[in-house]
Image (spheres, rainbow, N blue to C red):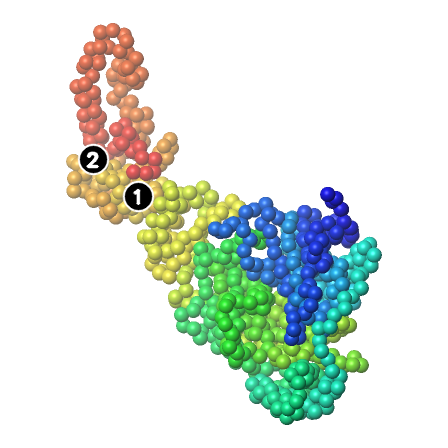
Amino acid sequence: MSNPLGVTKTIDFGDGKVIEIETGRLAKQANGSVVLKMGNTMILATVVAAPEHKEGADFLPLTVDYQEKFASVGRIPGGFLKREARLSDYEILISRLVDRAIRPLFSEDYHADTQVMLTLISSDENIMPDCLVGLAASSAIMLTDLPFNGPMSEVRVGRIDGKFVINPYKSELEHCDIDMIVAGTMNDINMVEGEMNEISESDMVEALKFAHDAIKKQCQAQLELCELLGGRKARMEYNHEVNSEEVKKQVYADLYDKVYAIAKSQAPKKERSKAFSEIVKEYIAAMPEDTTDEVKGLVKKYYGHVQYDAMRNMVLNEKVRLDGRKLNEVRPIWTEVNYLPSAHGSAVFTRGETQSLTSVTLGSKLDEQMLDSPMNSGFNRFMLHYNFPGFSTGEVKPNRGPARREIGHGNLAMRGLKKILPGDDVNPYVIRVVSDILESNGSSSMATVCAGCMALMDAGVQVKNMVSGIAMGLISGEEGKYSILTDILGDEDHLGDMDFKVVGTKNGITAVQMDIKIDGLRWEIVEEALNQAKEGRLHILGEMSKTIAEPASDYKPHTPRIVRIDVATEFIGAIIGPGGKMIQGIQKETGTSISITEEGNKGIVEIASNDKAGMEKAVKIIEGIIAVPEVGEVYEGVVKTITEFGAFVEFLPGKDGLLHISEISWKKLPSMEGVMEVGEEVKVKLIEVDKKTGKYRLSRKVLLPRPEGMPEPDENEGRERRDNRDRGGDRGRDNRGPRNDNRDRGGRDNRDRGPRNDNRDRDRGPRNDNRDRNNDNRNRGNGGDGNSQATNDAYNFDGEL
């Protein structure tokens, strides 16, 4: 069977990033398919369209799905099924990048089911696929006969040390102050999504221009690929709409003035919607009885066109908006913080008929979100979840989890807020922000940004700057007429030519999202829109500051407190303990949650608790574990074991020392009976650390008043006795001469030397017993120094009892 190599087009920008687009080799039964390759990253793009549209369809049912195969990174999926499941949020966000860029390029009267599938079949850990999928999708569509007004492409633009870079490597992103995906055609940009570090409006425009230059080269490469295959296919013939110029003219003539009057009435959203609905209902009811359903359907269709044109013309010609505002005017704002008493932080942000109730929850490292996808794994410490229930627009809608729109809007708000969060050295918490949209009439995602910032400040998170967001619109007409709208309504979003959301601080832009529906957008209009957005953004910041101007100085009383302790890596094992026994015991004893991570050459211990006393106790225990005992220091210890020659005292967590009977009191104690109890707290002083064994010698009596008349000890004598103890009690053995040497060799070797050894063996029983008793006597007789060999033998626990 033949294995055709297909046709390949190469795109080389001269910076080492070479892109190859191949077709004719894989997935040939799709309407169009390509394999895009850059480095080891390979993306299979396929396009399939239904031959006919569904009856009654009046929109384009386009589906774009991007999926990453775990095999592309040499991994087996987790979970029970061990296979790829539903698309992750990350994959949905990439799917939206392509959908928003290609959807407006299909002809408006094309309504057949169309599916674009993008599959990551091989990956390169340093090459991000999200900046390549748009090029792959457009290349596949260009090989079909679908009514697609492309080509288009997408690129990522970054800026490193003031220099713009196209499609920076993953390792370079952390050095970029701009991270933005830009899509466009040969003539215009039509989609923007990204985040940045408080950059200026002029820098934003320069980044867009730089990206567009690269987009034009990639669009040209797609045209050349088509030429290699003999040119673009002739556009398909289709008829997905029934039209009647006669009905259209009649509807415009009868209803335009009525619609214009309602649009200009400045009525609230519900009243305006009801009035618009009543017009068409009355009009259809007044039509002759023999009017067909087809004609009635056309009336409804053209009535929508009448509304669209009447509202646009009102704005363009009279500079009047649906709610009576000026073009650059922001709707009335009211805000409140600490609205939810049990949340760690909360805020209500209301702008006109859009309202967000946002909460902030602060958690420990144990609350981190685990990311497990082929190209996006690790842990996430900041989450933002955006909910858009049906009641927010007065609709009945099943609550079945977030749709793609909610995921996309939440991601935009998250990217804008992320830039103002303090570093991990200042903020030890995992943060979850939840925005519940309670009312919606335009830009609920920007309301989420504003409410999220205020809720973070209310929670005591020390944000770097206050941030706000605003949605801009554009209506353009003939002869170069245009109007830029600040803080657009829902209807203005629908009838406008541009939806431009900008998030930023007083210093600059932190996130942006743009969707453009028209051709021929001039750069000066983009720059004007950005500057007008800045004015609105600063106004909103001023309104927010009236409620809360700076972060709370402390967290709420019910917020879990987190203490972070940096430790040397060699102490991590001691804190965890054998089988986790130590750390589990600390958590159980103190009621805290403890996590340990290793970063570089240090360990990071995070202790979280709602109970201040438990937190302090856990901190004290861990500080004790990592503490290095110092001779001369006084410690609060606990008696762990009592022997006849003293007690073992835990003076630091996991560190026991010998408190000899002679070091308990200035008075000579005959025995340990009744002197101490296990569990008793006792204050001790570390007086010596054995240089050979590392074992600790404690004293209690040195902390007690010295009895009157008791002579001071001779320091040299004490040192001499300790030296003798270190030699294993040689004072007694030296007097025994050769016999001591024989005993050092164990005696067992001498058994072969005849009767004398046998006699020694026979006599050894009682003599050994006497020696043991003598050793015990020596222990008791040494009194003040307690440095006998028996003591050293007994103190052989290696840190554990």
Q: Position of residue 703 (x, y in %)?
A: 27, 45
Q: Nearer the viewer, residue 84 or 484?
A: 84
- Which quadrant of the rendered structure holds the N terminus? top right
- Snapshot quadrant of residue 486: bottom right
Q: Is residue 479 left or right of residue 682?
A: right
Q: Residue at x 65, y 73 (%)?
A: 55
- The amino acid beneath tag 2 is Glu
| Local crowd size for mark 1, using a 10 Å CA cut-off: few (<14), some (14–19), many (≥20) | many
Dot label at residue 644: 2
Q: Nearer the viewer, residue 659 or 458?
A: 458
- Which quadrant of the rendered structure holds the C terminus? top left
- The amino acid beneath tag 1 is Glu
Dot label at residue 458: none
CA–CA distance in space, label 2 to label 1: 18 Å
- Snapshot quadrant of residue 468: bottom right
User: Which residue was labeled with disc 1?
Assistant: 650
Q: Residue at x 29, y 30 (%)?
A: 792
- Which element is circle 2 on? loop
- Which element is circle 1 on? strand
